[in-house]
Image: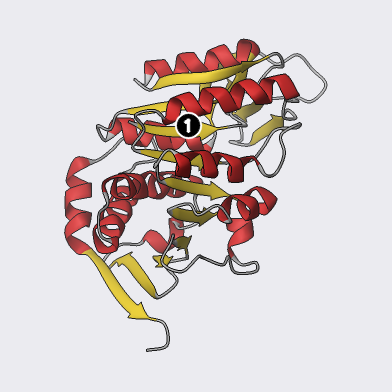
Amino acid sequence: MIVTITLNPVLRVEYTAGSVAKGQANHVRRVRYRAGGRGLAVARVLQTFGHDVVAGGLAGGSAGELIRNDLARAGVATQFTRIAAESRRIVAVADESDGEVTSFAEPAPYITTEELGRLAADYRELLTGATAVVLCGSLPEGLPAEIYGSFASYAAEAGVPVVLNAGGNALAYGAKRGPALIVPEAESAGRAPIRLEPGRGAIAVLSRDRVLVRTDAEEWRAGLGAADSSEAAVDDLLMDALVAGFVPGIALGWSWPEILQHAVALGAAWGPDGELDVHEYERALASVDVERSRFGS
C-alpha cells in the first residue's frame, strides 16, 4: 500500500457563467467540485495505474467532505484526520463570453495542537503495511515547518521509504531526515543545494526538457527523445504525474534507469483530462533515453 499525505488540500470549485459582470448578480450555468493538492493528484495517478493507495492528511468541514467524496468517485481510498476548521477552497469563475477565468483562494485553516497530535497518531497507523509514503505540498497555519522532518523520521523507524515533494522550510527540514527521494518545488529547485548523506537518498529536479536525479556520487538524466515535453515541463499536471511515477520504483527497489523510464513515460501519457493513455505510455517507455555520469569523471 502506498500512502500519500496532503496537509493542506483544497476544494476546487469551478463555476461556468455565460458572462460575468462585476458588481452584479451572475447566474452560473455549471458547477464542478474537485479535490486538489499534489498529494491527492499523485494518489489519483497511482490509483489509475493500478496501485493500492490511500490518501491521508487533514480535512475538515463541508469542503473536507466534498474532497473525500470526489476522491471516492475516483476510486481513491481516504483516511484523513478530521479538523474543526473548513478546508480551504479555490473558486474559479469562467466567463464563456471572453474565456477569462477569475479565481478566489481562501486562506489555509488553522490546525490546533490537539489536531496535530491526532494527525501524528493517524500517520503512524498508516505506516503499518505501507510500502512507500509520499509527503507533498504546503502546510496550513499552526503546523510547524519541521513536520515533514518528523514524518520522514517516523517512516524511517518503520522501514518505509519516503518521497518528499515540498518547498521552503518544509523541504529543508524534511530533507535532513533521509527521504529516499527529494523533489523540490519549482521555487526551491534553484536555491542552496541540499546535502545528502553518503550513500543515502537522491534529489530529482525537473528542468525544461528532462528529469535529473542526483545521488551523492552520480547523476542520471532522462528525457523523451522525440517528445515536445519541454513546453510542458513546468506544468503542474506533468509534475503530478512525474512524482507519482517515481513512487513504485522507490517502493519496489528498482534501479534508477527503470524508475526514470517509468516516471517520464507516465508524464508523457497522463493527459490534461486526468486520463492515462496506455498506448502513449508504452510508446514513450520505449523512447526514454537515460544517461549516467559520475561526479568528477
In this view, the residue in front, 226 or 249, is: 249
Identity of the residue drawn at 50% across and 48% down: 164
164 left or right of 61 in image? left
* Residue 249 in picture, x, y percent from top left: 29, 49
Identity of the residue drawn at 45% across and 58% down: 233
Instruction: Decide: is 296 above or below 66.
Output: below
* Residue 241 in picture, x, y percent from top left: 39, 45
Instruction: Decide: is 201 above or below 150.
Output: below
In this view, the residue in front, 235 or 72, is: 72
**Residue 274 can be seen in this image:** no
* Residue 210 in picture, x, y percent from top left: 39, 66
Identity of the residue drawn at 43% across and 62% down: 200
Instruction: Decide: is 3 above or below 225.
Output: above
Image quadrant occupied by the C terminus = bottom left
In this view, the residue in front, 285 or 33, is: 285
Q: Residue furthest front?
A: 157
At label 1, counting other C-alpha atoms closer than 10 Å, the crowd grade (few under 14, some 14-19, many 20 or more) is many
* Residue 115 in picture, x, y percent from top left: 68, 20
**Residue 157 can be seen in this image:** yes
Instruction: Decide: is 98 above or below 60.
Output: below
- The type of residue carrying mark 1 is Leu
Q: Name the residue under label 1.
A: 40
